[in-house]
Image (spheres, rainbow, N blue to C red):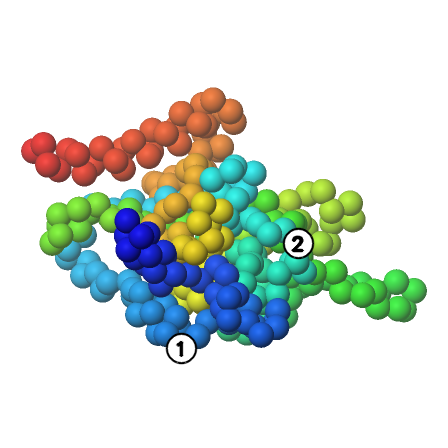
Amino acid sequence: MKNLIFLFCLLLSVNSFSQANILNASNPSEIGIQNFDQKQSDNDSFLEFDYIDERDILWSKIVYEKIDLNEKLNFPLLFPVNDETYEKNRKSLWRILKENIINKRITELYFDRNDNFKDKMSFGDVMEVVSFTELINGVQTPAEELKSIDITAYRIKGMWYFDKRQGEMKYRLLGLMPVGKNLKDDDGKNNTDLFWIWYPSIRKILHEEKVFNDKNNASSISFDQLLVSRRFSSFIYKEDNVYGDRSIKDYKIPGLESILESQRIKKEILDFEQDMWNR
């Protein structure tokens, strides 16, 4: 029995990332720093998106969804909302994005007014959204930066497709957009779409950061794994369609009608794979 318990603990420790090095740290600044073996294991677990031949796609549909951070299932993307509490070992999704935008590791950013990634933003454009200063009586005010607590949701764009070579329905995440506080709004109460990020360009960055697991600190997945495997709650607000990809709100009354339409689109996607095997 003791051997089984020891083996179980050993297996858990192999996947220990959320509190990496906490037992070996000689001072608090070393907590969260992975050792060589952990880094190698982490790198080995990263899976590139497969190359997809267009001829293998039997059916596809692009959908746009909203991830509401007020929903409990989505809390791992939101917390911790205080960016100063943890230095390295725990970060919200927004903190990861902001840090890597500022250090210019994330560069594939696009204006929210075009969700087909045609209107690229410069670094200066992005910083006007992330950090805001203004001149008052000729004096520049201290920069106000968007914090994790200011982000209320994420929009995602992705494609569902049926791969006839492998005979299964798959999902490919294409874009991610934070939704949050408009720093240029005087009262700061109005949320706005910030910018689109081309998701494949940030996968490796998100793979380096681990999601906090409140069920077991010794086992966690990366932010990339969470998003790619769709471990979140969302609702569809738009699909590609003949009407210029109009939103559900443009043809359905907000509320119950919009919810039912969102569920109809989701059911259509799920039913396609079932119908394929029943033919």
Q: Quadrant of residue 8?
A: bottom left
Check disc 2 and report its element: helix, strand or loop: loop
Q: Is residue 230 above or below residue 120?
A: above
Using a 10 Å C-alpha cutoff, classify the residue at mark 2 as few (fewer than 14 neighbours), some (14 to 19) or many (20 or more).
few
Residue 119 appears in the rendering: no
Along the line of sight, the residue nearer the viewer: 35 or 183: 35
Residue 121 pos. (x, y %): 55, 66
User: Residue at 27% across / 37% down in the picture?
Assistant: 269
Residue 25 pos. (x, y %): 55, 71
Using a 10 Å C-alpha cutoff, classify the residue at mark 1 as few (fewer than 14 neighbours), some (14 to 19) or many (20 or more).
few
Going by the numbered disc 1, the residue's amino acid type is: Phe
Image quadrant containing the C terminus: top left
Q: Is residue 69 above or below residue 260?
A: below
Residue denoted by label 1: 36
Residues under labels 1 and 2: Cα distance? 30 Å
User: Residue at 45% across / 23% down in the picture?
Assistant: 257
Q: Which mark is residue 82?
A: 2
